């Protein structure tokens, strides 16, 4: 995604502009430390490229920016549930329009905060009141924090994920570590299986690592780099790559798209979290290149 080519709608500050791509409004950051983009549709981080590096985040060449369906790539926000436990799959936050609450453009970094709260439309899908805040901090690393607050008078349950699509040079050479000692295999009837915490790739994976470490590393020899991911507020790391056969069944992924991506998600995918009225939960991820 060439961020400089996006047509500017409004200049917000020296390094931050509002742009438009098809049906979505995009906050674009062109800062000496990094370039980044966030779609208001989905509150969806689209790109993060620290100075001197290729993008750390993968975006599908066939992604749909109509604003009608979730965007394939970036960091979709799965909320208030993860997976297909209800409809729509991965919740409604990734296909809702978030509001820009504030931004702060500094010499050393940029922050952007978006919000999403309940509406009659959201309550028709999920009958609760909530207030979500999504805070992004950009410098040499990317920090994303989702704060979910119960503004209802009843307790409610939530699960979810920051469903990060990491960019890799060649998935066949990549190695992910820090995964803990067991996983549930989504491609084998949710069997609970032991592991040494390291994963290499030669086929589709869809796994929930329920004892992942807070910090994971993705070795990427093809791009001569290692990505570091530090998660917080999660109970699992979900790892997903659809491989060739899965990509072939997706209208918004090119046939070879799977070779340059790996989803490593900071997720609440085990037991859902109960929030009482007034309580909040923070789910975050920090990503950098070494
Ligand atoms: O196609 P989506 O709804 O975006 O979901 C993409 C993937 O998300 C997660 O990683 C799940 O574990 C996978 O089972 C799912 O296929």
Image: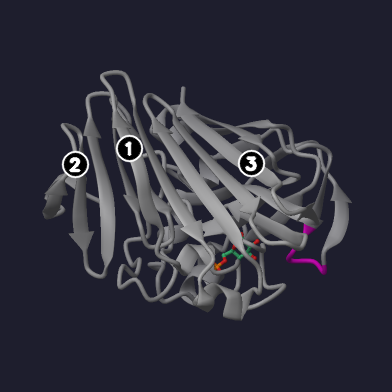
Report the Cα–Cα distance between label 3 and label 2. Answer: 28 Å
The quarter holding residue 140 reads: top left
The secondary structure that dominates the magenta segment is loop
Pick whichever, 206 or 102, lies toward us: 102
Q: Mark 3 points at which residue?
A: 282
**In the picture provided, is 49 more to the left or to the right than 181?**
left
Q: Which of marks 1 and 2 is nearer the N terminus?
A: 2
Up/down of 156 relative to 237, above or below: below
Q: Where is residue 170 in the image (x, y as percent from the top left)?
A: 45, 45
- How packed is label 2: few (under 14 Cα within 10 Å), some, or many (20 or more)? some
**Quadrant position of residue 29:** top left
In the image, is the residue at mark 2 within 8 Å of ligand 1 by its beta carbon? no
- Image location (x, y in percent) of residue 78: 58, 59
Q: How crowded is mark 3: few (under 14 residues within 10 Å), some or many (20 or more)?
A: some
Please state the extent of the stretch shown in magenta in the rendering.
Answer: 185-189
Q: Residue furthest bottom?
A: 124
Q: To which residue does mark 1 refer?
A: 103
CA–CA distance between discs 3 and 1?
A: 20 Å
Q: Tell me if mark 1 has few (under 14), some (14-19) or many (20+) residues whose alpha carbon lies within 10 angstroms of its own.
A: some
Instruction: Estimate the x, y position of residue 152 in percent, counting from the top left.
Output: 67, 61
Asked if residue 288 is positioned above or below residue 60 in the image, the reply reads above
Residue 200 pos. (x, y %): 64, 43
């Amino acid at each position: 995604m060439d961020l400089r080519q996006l047509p500017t709608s409004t200049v917000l500050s020296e390094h931050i502009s509002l742009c438009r791509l098809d049906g979505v409004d995009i906050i674009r950051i062109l800062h000496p430390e990094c370039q980044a983009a966030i779609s208001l549709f989905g509150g969806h981080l689209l790109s993060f490229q620290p100075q001197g590096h290729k993008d750390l985040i993968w975006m599908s060449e066939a992604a749909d920016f109509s604003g009608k369906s979730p965007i394939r790539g970036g960091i979709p926000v799965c909320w208030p549930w993860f997976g297909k436990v209800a409809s729509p799959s991965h919740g409604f936050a990734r296909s809702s329009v978030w509001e820009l609450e504030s931004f702060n453009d500094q010499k050393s970094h940029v922050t952007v905060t978006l919000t999403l709260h309940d509406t009659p439309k959201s309550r028709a899908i999920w009958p609760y009141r909530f207030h979500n805040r999504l805070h992004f901090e950009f410098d040499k690393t990317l920090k994303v924090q989702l704060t979910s607050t119960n503004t209802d008078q009843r307790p409610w349950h939530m699960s979810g994920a920051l469903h990060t699509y990491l960019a890799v040079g060649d998935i066949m050479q990549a190695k992910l570590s820090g995964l803990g000692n067991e996983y549930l295999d989504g491609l084998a009837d949710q069997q609970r299986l032991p592991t040494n915490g390291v994963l290499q790739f030669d086929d589709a994976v869809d796994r929930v690592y329920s004892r992942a470490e807070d910090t994971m590393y993705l070795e990427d020899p093809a791009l001569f780099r290692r990505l570091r991911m530090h998660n917080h507020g999660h109970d699992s790391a979900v790892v997903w790559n659809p491989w060739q056969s899965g990509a072939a069944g997706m209208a918004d992924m090119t046939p070879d798209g799977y070779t340059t991506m790996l989803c490593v998600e900071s997720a609440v995918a085990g037991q859902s979290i109960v929030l009482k009225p007034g309580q909040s939960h923070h789910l975050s991820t920090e990503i950098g290149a070494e």
